[in-house]
Amino acid sequence: MQLIQTGKYSRVHFDPARDHFIKTFHPKAFDRLRYLTRIRPYPGHNFALVAARLEALGIATPRIVETRPYRLVTDNVHGEPLRAHILDSPNLQEQYLDALAAFDHEGIHCRGLHTENFLVHEGRMVAIDLDAYKLPRWRRYPRREYLDCLSRSLAGPEYFLFERLLERLNLDAQYRPKS
């Protein structure tokens, strides 16, 4: 097992013998209480719920091998970061914008929709790190927060993608509907 990443509340290992990624979650006590009381789904289960919703929308996700409340095992996608290809690929730009527009339409919220959280495998974009996504349950997450986070994520040479998303959503720079 190789330690790939250590985050504030999770660790990712790679098992080369099985070609799997194993993510274990170590949430703070308050979040554990929210999972226990079913206010929010456990992170491992949330990944599976989000993956099913994205697959229904035509957005590729890693194949899930095992799901537990605080553990997730997925197949290796064998992809490269979208960021390395998006500036030179109109096809990948369209796939990314299609996904972002679908997230907005479906009320799927995530603060980490930058191009490092997507991989490219055989010309197709694959969404990863799905445990951070939030599906709407009782209410839709604020659109402004989603768009503000996305505008910061796409700063620099990728910002044109944010502008194209606003056009696609028929919104002006203040996120108001265009007349």
Image (cartoon, rainbow, N blue to C red):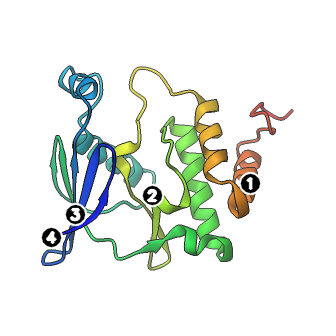
What is the C-alpha distance between the residues marked 2 and 1? 19 Å
Residue type at mark 3 is: His
Residue position for label 2:
59
> Mark 4 highlights which residue?
1
Mark 3 or mark 4, which is nearer the start of the sequence? 4
Q: Nearer the viewer, mark 4 or mark 2?
A: 4
Instruction: Determine whether, in the image, residue 55 is placed left or right of residue 117.
Output: left
Q: Distance from label 1 to label 3 (Cα)?
A: 36 Å
Q: Which residue is mark 1?
A: 164
Q: Is residue 143 left or right of residue 106?
A: right
Q: Residue at x 18, y 43 (%)?
A: 70
Q: Residue at x 78, y 32 (%)?
A: 177
What residue is disc 3 on?
13
Element under label 2? loop
Residue, x 57% and y 63% (percent of image)? 95
Q: Are marks 4 and 3 in contact (CB under 8 Å)?
A: yes
Nearer to me, 154 or 5: 5
Measure how far apart labels 2 and 3 are at the Cα level: 24 Å
